[in-house]
Image: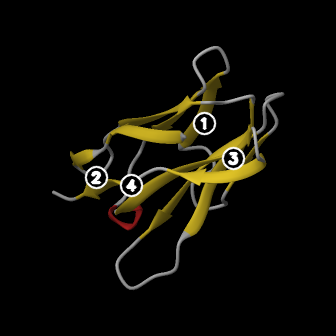
Amino acid sequence: QVQLVESGGGLVQPGGSLGLSCAASGSIFHVYTMGWSRQAPGKQRESVATITSTGNINYAESVKGRFTISRDNTKNTVYLQMNSLKPEDTAVYYCNADIKVAAGIRDYWGQGTQVTVSS
C-alpha cells in the first residue's frame, strides 16, 4: 500500500511565502513524475508544477517565477516553495506521483492541504 502524505499549507498574507512537502511511503519500486495540483472553490483542479525523476520541470504559466518545485529522490519527497503569493493562489493543493508498485505503475494522490492567501 502506498500513501502520499502532505504537510505545510495554512494562512498567509498576500506577498508572503509558504512551503509544502509531500512524502510517498509504502511498497515502492520507483517514483516517476511527481507534481502539485490545486483546486479553488468552484473551479476545476489544475496542474501547478511537475518534476520528473531526472529533474525535468514544468510550471503552470500562472506560477512561473513565483513557485519552485523540487524533490529528494532518497526520501521519495516532493516540495513546493511558493513565494509572492496572491489571493488567487488560494486553493486546496494536492500532490500526486506516478509510482511503480508490484502491480505496475499507478497514479497516487495526497489528501490535500489548504492554502489561503488573505490579508
13 sits to left or right of 47: left
> Which residue is labeled 4 in the image?
112
Which of discs 2 and 3 lies nearer the camera? The answer is 3
Please tell me whether mark 3 sits on a helix, a strand or a loop: strand
Q: Which label was assigned to residue 32?
A: none
Which residue corresponds to mark 2?
A: 14
Residue 37 appears anywhere in the view: yes
Neighbour tally class for label 2: few under 14, some 14-19, many 20 plus, Cα within 10 Å? some
Q: Residue at x 31, y 54 (%)?
A: 115
Q: Of label 1 and label 2, which has the lower sequence position?
A: 2
Judging by the rendered image, the residue that carries numbered circle 1 is 69
- What distance separates the C-alpha of mark 2 from that of mark 3? 24 Å
* Mark 1–mark 2 distance (CA, rounded to whole Å): 20 Å
Q: Is the residue under label 3 in contact with that under label 1 (CB below 8 Å)? A: yes
Q: Amino acid at mark 4?
A: Gly
- Which numbered disc flags the more N-terminal residue, 3 or 4? 3
